[in-house]
């Protein structure tokens, strides 16, 4: 018989409104919630004033009746001997008390409830709460933050301090548990228990925490600690519905484990893992996970002094483009091979504000293309919201498109629309290619690392066939906000870290001049730790660039 873990009661509420989820994926849209909450507070205060006035009237009436009953109960018959008193008693019971009942039950909350009902359709739902919790866990893992650091709000770059209560930590652990994520279940339940041990008051009890914690550590294979925690649970709640049977099962499993160890003539000792309650993070599908997350933390960056000497800054006029001849842009080398450059002051604050204003109503959960089917779908490894802007949306979009064309020397006629993305809580885009992979790339034959990468990330259907413009030859990425912590663009293959800076843009080619993909350009948007990250990008395609970026004499030119 398997042990039982704590189960949750899910109640499905039939709602007449439509719940718009995914708020946590866009800080830009979450700002609207601030103003909605402010309006509700104003409405709530008005409701309180009405209630206080109503209660004041009820209290006044109650005081008057209390004085009357104090006198009448001292000598009921004598009191009723006076016919006026008798009449008033009948009247009070027949009319006044009914009026009072109406006053007490008066629906003075109608306006507030109506306002709440209207506003509630725009509130985050269960999916948002779960997504927000997972975002915190993602930040916890990527930036190696312990639960206590997050619970106490000790994050870099923030001017606000916001803490999590023991109940909040319990909720985090519960969400992880429901997702089968026992690693994070243990971390957050331990934090909840620690805060209770420190004397914090909470709705959830230590017994409830131990219920989840004991089963989670058992699922992680730590039978010793599962037994220990279950015994603590029984000590707190001897009548717990699962603890007794779970303890018997855990003890039986522990005896079996010890017998197997004796059979193998190995000593039974508690491991540091069991003693400390620290468990290994589960492995996932991403081959370069460690490299990617280390770069996000600013570790493992491969900018050597020798490479730095090969990087320069200059004024760039787009090969004497009429657009830039009198006002060239500042160009800085970010990396030498593959070449990545940053352009300074590409977008003005006014242009950025306008682009954000245009994009905000259109923001929708960002999608990725399924490598097997070619169909766009939502994925956990891309957490943001995006919108597409066309030139006719506003003159500023046309102006920005023209500027990017002048800077790069590539035509925007065959480029995709301007994509605007806003990253919310823990917003990220794990390592990916901007170009569509093909069945065979001759450039991989001489590079073992890139060949391994190619084998791990198999070819996909021609994702851009329907566009009729070929593959994505280059990426132009505009940073439209500063980010206080996190949110860097990293290239795991060669260890580059490019940090957001408002008004600047970075540019690189995804394809060699031969048209083959440059697999070194696999890149990622690190999770946003503190701040709100806005970017916009233009993907240039092959068609139309034949004379602007001619083919090279070799495959890798």
Image (spheres, rainbow, N blue to C red):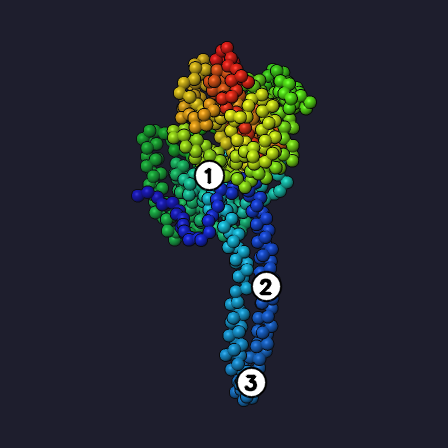
Residue 16 - label: none
Contact flag, marks 3 and 1 (Cβ < 8 Å): no
* Residue 191 visible within the image: no
* Number of callouts: 3
In this picture, is 424 found above or below 91? above
When asked about the image quadrant of residue 335, the answer is: top right
- What residue is disc 2 on? 50
Q: Nearer the viewer, residue 413 or 88?
A: 413
Chain-order first, disc 3 or disc 1: 3
Name the residue carrying label 1. Answer: 184
Picture residue at 34% right of the left edge, 39% below the top: 253
Q: Residues within 10 Å of mark 3 (few under 14, many from 20)?
A: some
Front position among marks 1 and 2: 2
The secondary element bearing badge 2 is classed as: helix
Question: x and y percent of residue 149 in the render?
Answer: 56, 39
Q: Tag 2 or tag 3, which sits nearer the N-term?
A: 2
Question: Residue 53 in the image: x percent, y percent?
Answer: 60, 66
Residue positioned 59% across, 52% down in the render: 39
Depicted 382 relative to depicted 332: above or below = below
Q: CA distance from mark 3 to mark 2?
A: 33 Å
- Numbered circle sitting on residue 85: 3
Viewer-nearest of discs 3 and 2: 2
Lower position in the chain sequence, tag 1 or tag 2:
2
User: Crowdedness of circle 2 by 10 Å Cα count: few (<14), some, many (20+)?
Assistant: some
Q: Position of residue 24 (x, y in %)?
A: 52, 41
How far apart marks 1 and 2 lie (CA) works out to 46 Å
Mark 3 secondary-structure assignment: helix
> What residue appears at the point 59 percent right and 61 percent down from the top-left corner?
48
Which quadrant of the figure has residue 334? Answer: top right
Q: Tell me which residue sits at (58%, 24%) in the image.
A: 405
């Amino acid at each position: 018989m398997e042990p039982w873990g704590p189960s949750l009661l899910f109640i499905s509420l039939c709602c007449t409104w439509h719940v718009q989820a995914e708020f946590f994926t866009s800080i830009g849209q979450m700002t609207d919630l601030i103003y909605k909450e402010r309006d509700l507070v104003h409405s709530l205060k008005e409701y309180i004033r009405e209630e206080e006035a109503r209660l004041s009237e009820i209290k006044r009436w109650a005081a008057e009746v209390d004085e009357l009953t104090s006198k009448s109960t001292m000598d009921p018959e004598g009191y009723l001997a006076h016919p006026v008193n008798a009449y008033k008693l009948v009247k009070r019971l027949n009319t006044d008390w009914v009026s009072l009942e109406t006053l007490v039950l008066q629906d003075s909350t109608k306006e507030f409830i109506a306002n709440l009902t209207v506003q509630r359709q725009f509130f985050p739902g269960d999916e948002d709460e779960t997504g927000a919790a997972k975002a915190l866990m993602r930040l916890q893992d990527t930036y190696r933050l312990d639960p206590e650091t997050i619970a106490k709000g000790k994050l870099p770059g923030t001017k606000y301090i916001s803490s999590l209560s023991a109940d909040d930590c319990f909720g985090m652990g519960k969400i992880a548990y429901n997702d089968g994520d026992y690693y994070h279940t243990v971390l957050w339940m331990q934090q909840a228990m620690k805060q209770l041990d420190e004397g914090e008051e909470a709705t959830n009890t230590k017994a409830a925490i131990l219920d989840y914690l004991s089963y989670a550590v058992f699922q992680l294979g730590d039978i010793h600690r599962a037994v220990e925690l279950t015994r603590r649970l029984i000590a707190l709640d001897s009548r717990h519905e699962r603890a007794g049977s779970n303890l018997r099962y855990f003890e039986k499993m522990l005896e079996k484990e010890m017998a197997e160890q004796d059979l193998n003539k190995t000593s039974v000792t508690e491991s540091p893992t069991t003693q400390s309650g620290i468990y290994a993070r589960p492995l996932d599908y991403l081959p370069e996970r460690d490299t990617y997350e280390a770069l996000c933390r600013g570790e493992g960056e491969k900018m050597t002094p020798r490479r730095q000497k090969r990087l320069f800054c200059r004024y760039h006029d787009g090969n004497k483009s009429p657009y830039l001849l009198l006002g060239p842009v500042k160009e800085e080398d970010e990396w030498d091979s593959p070449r990545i450059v940053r352009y300074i002051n590409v977008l003005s604050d006014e242009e950025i504000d306008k682009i954000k204003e245009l994009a905000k109503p259109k923001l929708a959960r960002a999608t990725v293309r399924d490598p097997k089917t070619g169909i766009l779908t939502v994925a956990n490894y891309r957490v943001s919201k995006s919108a597409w802007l066309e030139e006719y949306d506003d003159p500023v979009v046309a102006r920005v498109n023209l500027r990017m064309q002048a800077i790069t020397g590539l035509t925007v006629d065959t480029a995709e629309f301007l994509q605007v993305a806003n990253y919310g809580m823990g917003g990220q885009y794990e390592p990916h290619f901007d170009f569509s992979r093909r069945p065979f790339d001759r450039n991989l034959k001489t590079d073992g690392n890139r060949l391994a990468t190619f084998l791990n990330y198999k070819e996909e259907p021609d994702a851009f066939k329907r566009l009729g413009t070929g593959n994505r030859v280059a990426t132009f990425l505009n940073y439209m906000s500063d980010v206080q912590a996190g949110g860097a663009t990293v290239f795991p293959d060669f260890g580059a870290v490019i940090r957001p800076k408002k008004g600047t843009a970075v540019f690189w080619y995804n394809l060699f001049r031969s048209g083959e993909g440059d697999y070194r350009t696999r890149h990622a948007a690190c999770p946003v730790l503190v701040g709100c990250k806005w970017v916009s990008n233009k993907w240039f395609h092959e068609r139309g660039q034949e004379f602007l970026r001619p083919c090279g004499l070799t495959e890798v030119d």
